[in-house]
Image (tube, rainbow, N blue to C red):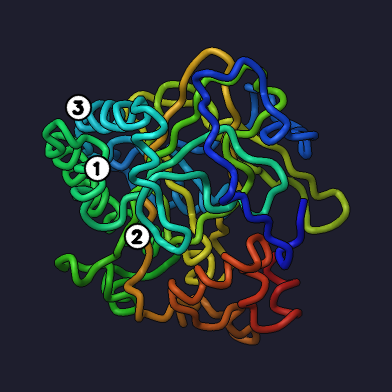
Amino acid sequence: MPTASEPIRHHHAHPLDFESVREVPDSHAWPDLHDHPTASAQGAAVPVVDLSASDTNVLEQMARACESWGAFQVTGHGVPPGLLRRVEAAARGLFALPTNRKLEAARPAEGVSGYGRARISCFFPKLMWSEGFTIAGSPLDHARTLWPDDDPLAFCDVIEEYKEEMKQLARKLMRMMLTSLGLTEVEAEAETGWIGPGDESGGMPAVLQLNSYPVCPDPDRAMGMAAHTDSTLLTLLFQSNTSGLQVLQVVGDNGCDRTARWVTVPPMPGALIVNVGDLFQILSNGRYRSVVHRAVVNGTSHRLSVAYMCGPPADSKVEPIGKLVGPGCGPVYRPVTWPEYLSVKGKLFDKALASVMRTKQACLEHI
């Protein structure tokens, strides 16, 4: 794997027509996918939190999940099941288009929105068995390009409806996660004013990422999405009924007996997955950790996922909340804006969080 200072540019490579290939080409063949053992179906399991539960343990469950896993599945969230089915159908319709049509809406090299391969591709020598479509702002212009002879509003309407539902849920989860850290709701909104009600010019801006993982002729040699953390506050992920998402669980103490293993997050009907992002790890002063996750591919089923990735307004500094900084131990991380952090992540990748730590000692105490 290249170091963070040696990104590999794959922009010259034409996207693979996944439907036509009968074997994994060298460009997509990963030499070793077993960097950590995979946990068995029994035992390890990403926690499930039911937001509709009336008992007081919900915040405690959320806190344990964020501290131990950096992720949890959430049910009882109120997002209509019909909307989840419609957004999946919209994504399937988009990725079913001919490759040359999708390339008409290709994401510019320095742009955000559009069709293309995973942004993290430049940090890996092999390409991933996936394709993606990023939506920042209105999807209308791209939809007109993708469906020039049809009405693009059907796609746009379901995307906008889904984004609105995710925005409301993200705000709710941010309040709950901050409260689970020991803050009152008043303190949570005082520390992060952008989680309160607001129009599109305020609140938490977000990007919607549609991901497609086609059927793979040799799943043991290909990777859908390589291991990474999200450069967000939190990410809300909807996955289709095909398994593929795995999170890295670290077990043991901080010493030599510390081990890591991949744990599959099985699809649950109607459930959404919440990933703690790098910025929330900063906000919590390292108490809640961003989760390392990846996606493996399947030999018989086409998998889809839809990620709602949200962060703070561009001009807002993210730094450890004062109440979470204990006596005798200062803030672990320096203040950083989302655009600044994205720039750092684009250069340093998995070393980005370490680069915004204040001191080496603080780093050692919170790993």
Q: Is the residue marked by circle 3 packed among few (<14), some (14-19), or many (20+) residues within 10 Å?
A: few
Q: Is the residue marked by circle 1 packed among few (<14), some (14-19), or many (20+) residues within 10 Å?
A: some
Using the numbered discs, state the Cα–Cα distance from disc 2 to disc 3 in whole angstroms. Answer: 25 Å
Using the numbered discs, state the Cα–Cα distance from disc 1 to disc 3 in whole angstroms. Answer: 27 Å
Query: Which residue has dot 3 on it?
Result: 82
Q: For the residue labelled by badge 1, is the local secondary structure a helix, a strand or a loop? A: helix
Residue sitting at x 63%, y 55%:
9
Disc 1 versus disc 2: nearer the observer: 1
> Residues at badges 1 and 3 in contact (C-beta under 8 Å)?
no
Percent coordinates x, y for residue 31 in the rendering: 79, 34
Disc 1 versus disc 3: nearer the observer: 1
The dot on residue 174 is 2
Amino acid type of the residue that numbered disc 2 sits on in the rendered structure: Met
Q: What residue occupies the far top of the structure in this picture?
A: 300
Residue sitting at x 69%, y 36%:
27
Using the numbered discs, state the Cα–Cα distance from disc 1 to disc 2 in whole angstroms. Answer: 35 Å
Confirm whether residue 186 shows in the render: yes
Q: For the residue labelled by badge 2, is the local secondary structure a helix, a strand or a loop? A: helix
Query: Which residue has dot 1 on it?
Result: 145
Q: For the residue labelled by badge 3, is the local secondary structure a helix, a strand or a loop? A: helix
Q: Is the residue marked by circle 2 packed among few (<14), some (14-19), or many (20+) residues within 10 Å?
A: some
Quarter placement of the C terminus: bottom right
Residue sitting at x 68%, y 60%:
7
Sequence-first tag of 1 and 3: 3
Percent coordinates x, y for residue 157 in the rendering: 14, 40
